[in-house]
């Protein structure tokens, strides 16, 4: 789950893909996850970090993270090994 | 513990900005959370009575009724409502209407018996519908109920029974007609345009065995056009005048049936029902003007009867339910599964019901499909609706569910939930208990040879 390297992310959650010209908004939890993904952190690290900051169970966060990643894949924001 | 210093979690979401302008997070949801119903917290209601749960407001029922009655009574001297039992026949609900002065409108022996058991006087029960058994008719004749004849076979059966009992049944005929709204409901009653209705009236008056007291029509349901009622009222008035001219017989009432649209939004409708549904005043104006302008000139103006159902009760009830799970569909859309489906929300087949969370939410939204819990593809509450981010165990309020759901619900794979009524002092009463497996099994019988297996 690596994010394409040319994707721009602003501090307030505005996401821009220069390759497609598409832009997106993420909410604060999503922004936190996205930034950790950009730093190459693992799923476990991300879940643990979110749990530090928010009132939520690890299981919930993990499930939501996988869904979030799936949405990013749908929006073609993820880097694949064959790309 | 540092729990309290942690922030409130909201699931992560990414939303595409269609116009490339970061103008807030897409469209804001247009609604607020509904955390309380008639002064009662949804969370408390669910904790005490379970989820899903039907919640009915006595205050709203009475308010709607008074508004409808006023719309007609300010325009016409003699008005009578008859509560359409099939719309919602929970006894407590029927009795609110009866306390407000409504008669009962029933369409089966079962509904007839319910009205009698509720204490409605026989002569204040209107008996409609194509399915009246001989036993039903005997009872109705003996009780002096108002029998609305649907077809010729019923007319002949009534004559036979009347002869045997030596009582004159009080009858009306149901008339169907072209009102300019299509498809016309021509399955029920006698047709106006092709002369069937006039023939039936002649048969009744010629036989001399029945009292023709009224004329009835019910032109359709969820009617958005007051002018259709004006057409129907003129046609009934014309029939009444023909009867007066030929037989010197004055009918006592004209019954315009039900069918006024409620504030719900029909599936596929672009505009919400609250914007396009005519008001009681609109319908009342159309009907009473048509009656007064008609060529009917009786000595006593006929009583105007209305059998309004859905428009009186739809917005007086809610279905509260709980989020079971969230899923991502293969096209990327979000789907949310509630514990209430089309088994108890039959009207989801007709309406795009408004659904709102019962707890606060933020302005992030997603296009969401909302499903019920049945293992069936047709169990869809909303195909696509902008929803805030929902979490498992969140509570949801489904609006405008008062009509037809608590009568057409089905016991499919699970048991039907409780129904509570919140009275005018905001006190909660259980008016129908949840079903138990024993209720269901008590009707079954397993033959001896099927009792045992390895
Ligand atoms: C004879 C008759 N009267 C009244 C009603 C109530 O109709 P609505 O709920 O559309 O007002 C119905 C419903 O189908 C009906 O068949």
Image (cartoon, coloured by chain):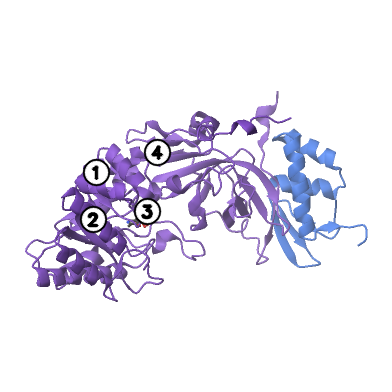
Closest to the camera, between mark 3 and mark 4, is 3
Mark 3 crowdedness (10 Å alpha carbons): few <14, some 14-19, many ≥20? many
Mark yes or no: residue B227 visible: yes
Mark nearer the N terminus (4 vs 1): 4
Query: Quadrant where the N terminus of chain B lies?
Result: top right
Q: Which residue is mark 1?
A: B100
Same-subunit check for callouts 3 and 1: yes
Q: Residue furthest bottom?
A: B194
Mark 4 crowdedness (10 Å alpha carbons): few <14, some 14-19, many ≥20? some
Q: Which residue is mark 3?
A: B310
Q: Nearer the viewer, residue B105 or B285?
A: B105
Mark nearer the N terminus (3 vs 4): 4
Q: Which residue is mark 2?
A: B160
Q: Is residue B443 left or right of residue A77?
A: left
Q: Which residue is mark 4?
A: B38
Q: Nearer the viewer, residue B186 or B231?
A: B186
The reply to whether the C-beta atoms of the residues labelled 2 and 4 are less than 8 Å apart is: no
Disc 4 is placed on an element classified as: loop
Chain letter for the residue marked with disc 1 in the picture: B
Q: Nearer the viewer, residue B307 or B338?
A: B307
Closest to the camera, between mark 2 and mark 4, is 2
Q: Residue at x 16, y 63 (%)?
A: B207
Disc 1 is placed on an element classified as: loop
Residue A36 position within the rendered picture, expressed as x and y whole percent measured from the top left:
82, 45
Q: Is mark 3 within 8 Å of ligand 1?
A: yes
Chain letter for the residue marked with disc 4 in the picture: B
Chain letter for the residue marked with disc 3 in the picture: B
Q: Is residue B11 left or right of residue B357?
A: right
Which chain is painted in blue? A
Q: Residue furthest top?
A: B1
């Amino acid at each position: 789950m690596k994010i394409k390297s040319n994707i721009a992310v602003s501090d307030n959650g505005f996401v821009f893909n220069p390759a497609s010209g598409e832009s997106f908004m993420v909410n604060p939890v999503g922004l936190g996850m996205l930034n950790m993904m950009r730093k190459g952190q693992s799923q476990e690290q991300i879940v643990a970090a979110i749990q530090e900051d928010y009132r939520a169970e690890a299981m919930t966060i993990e499930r939501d993270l996988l869904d979030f990643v799936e949405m990013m894949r749908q929006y073609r924001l993820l880097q694949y090994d064959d790309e | 513990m540092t729990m309290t210093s942690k922030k409130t979690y909201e699931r992560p979401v990414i939303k595409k900005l269609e116009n490339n302008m970061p103008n807030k997070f897409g469209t804001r949801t247009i609604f607020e959370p509904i955390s309380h119903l008639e002064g009662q917290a949804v969370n408390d209601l669910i904790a005490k009575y379970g989820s899903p749960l039907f919640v009915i407001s006595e205050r709203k029922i009475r308010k709607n009724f008074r508004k409808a009655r006023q719309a007609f009574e300010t325009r016409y001297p003699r008005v009578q409502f008859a509560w359409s039992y099939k719309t919602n026949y929970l006894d407590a609900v029927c009795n609110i209407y009866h306390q407000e002065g409504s008669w009962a409108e029933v369409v089966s022996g079962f509904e007839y018996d319910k009205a009698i058991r509720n204490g409605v006087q026989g002569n204040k029960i209107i008996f409609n519908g194509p399915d009246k058994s001989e036993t039903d008719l005997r009872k109705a004749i003996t009780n002096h109920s108002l029998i609305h004849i649907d077809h010729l076979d019923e007319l002949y059966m009534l004559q036979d029974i009347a002869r045997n009992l030596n009582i004159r049944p009080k009858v009306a005929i149901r008339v169907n007609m072209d009102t300019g709204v299509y498809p016309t409901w021509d399955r029920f009653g006698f047709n106006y345009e092709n002369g069937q209705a006039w023939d039936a009236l002649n048969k009744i008056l010629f036989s001399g065995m029945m009292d023709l007291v009224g004329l009835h029509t019910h032109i359709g349901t969820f009617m958005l056009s007051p002018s259709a009622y004006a057409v129907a009222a003129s046609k009934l008035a014309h029939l009444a005048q023909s009867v007066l001219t030929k037989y010197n017989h004055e009918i006592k009432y004209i019954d315009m049936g039900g069918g006024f649209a409620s504030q719900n939004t029909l599936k596929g409708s672009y505009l919400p029902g609250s914007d396009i549904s005519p008001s009681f005043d609109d319908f009342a104006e159309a009907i009473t003007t048509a009656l007064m302008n008609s060529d009917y000139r009786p000595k006593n103006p006929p009583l105007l009867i209305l059998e309004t159902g859905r428009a009186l009760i739809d917005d007086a009830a809610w279905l509260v339910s709980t989020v079971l799970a969230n899923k991502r569909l293969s096209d990327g859309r979000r789907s949310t599964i509630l514990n209430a489906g089309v088994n108890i929300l039959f009207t989801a087949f007709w309406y795009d019901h408004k659904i709102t969370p019962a707890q606060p939410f933020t302005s992030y939204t997603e296009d969401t499909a909302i499903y019920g819990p049945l293992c069936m593809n047709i169990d869809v509450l909303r195909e696509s609706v902008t929803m805030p981010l929902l979490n498992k165990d969140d509570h949801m309020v489904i609006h405008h569910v008062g009509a037809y759901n608590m009568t057409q619900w089905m016991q499919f794979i699970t048991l039907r939930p409780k129904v509570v009524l919140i009275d005018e002092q905001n006190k909660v009463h259980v008016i129908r208990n949840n079903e138990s497996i024993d209720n269901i099994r008590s009707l079954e019988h397993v033959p001896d040879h099927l009792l045992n297996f390895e």
